[in-house]
Structures are given as structure tokens and as C-alpha cells.
Image (cartoon, rainbow, N blue to C red):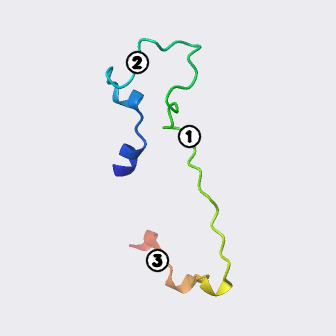
Amino acid sequence: MFRAMQNVVPSHLADFALFDFKSINKDSGVINGGDIGFDKEEIAPQVVEDEDLVVEFDPALQLNVTNL
């Protein structure tokens, strides 16, 4: 819920005081950053510089949730 509230733009709120819906037309272009609801999130790749910090995964510790 909190993540959804972070991604709200004024046009999502349908509030005429926050967003001028009447002036929108096909030639308006992107207004106030546009609608980002369906944009892919840009996540920076994480680089591990020290191989000693890498945690190895032990398959024996894996929980098989289909057997619960």
C-alpha cells in the first residue's frame, strides 16, 4: 500500500484542483512526468566487489512448500 502511494501522480487522484484535465488533448504530450503506473522500475545492478561477502546457498536448507 505504501509503495502504491509513492507512485501516485496528480492525474491518478482525479482531483481537478491538482490536475487540469480539461486542457488535455492528443497533442499535449507528457504532463508532470506522465503516468508512471506501467513503467518498468529501473533498478541499478548490484556489484559484489569482495567474493568473501557472497553467501552461498545450501540446497539442503530449501523448504519444499508443496509438501506442507
Task: Choose the circle earlier in sequence order: 3 or 2.
Answer: 2
Which residue is the site of mark 2? Answer: 20
The residue indicated by pointer 1 is: 39
Q: What type is the residue that disc 2 sits on?
A: Asp
Q: Is residue 17 above or below residue 9?
A: above
Q: Quadrant of residue 40?
A: top right
In screen coordinates, is 2 left or right of 60?
left
Closest to the observer, 1 or 61: 1
Question: Residue visible at 33% across and 20% down?
Answer: 16
Q: Amino acid at mark 3?
A: Leu
Q: Which residue is mark 3?
A: 63
Give the number of the mark in front: 3 or 2. Answer: 2
Instruction: Tell me if residue 26 comes above or below residue 3 in the rendering.
Output: above
Q: Nearer the viewer, mark 2 or mark 1?
A: 2
* Mark number displayed over residue 61: none
Rendering coords of residue 37 (x, y %): 48, 37
Name the amino acid type tagged 1. Asp
Q: Quadrant of the C terminus?
A: bottom left
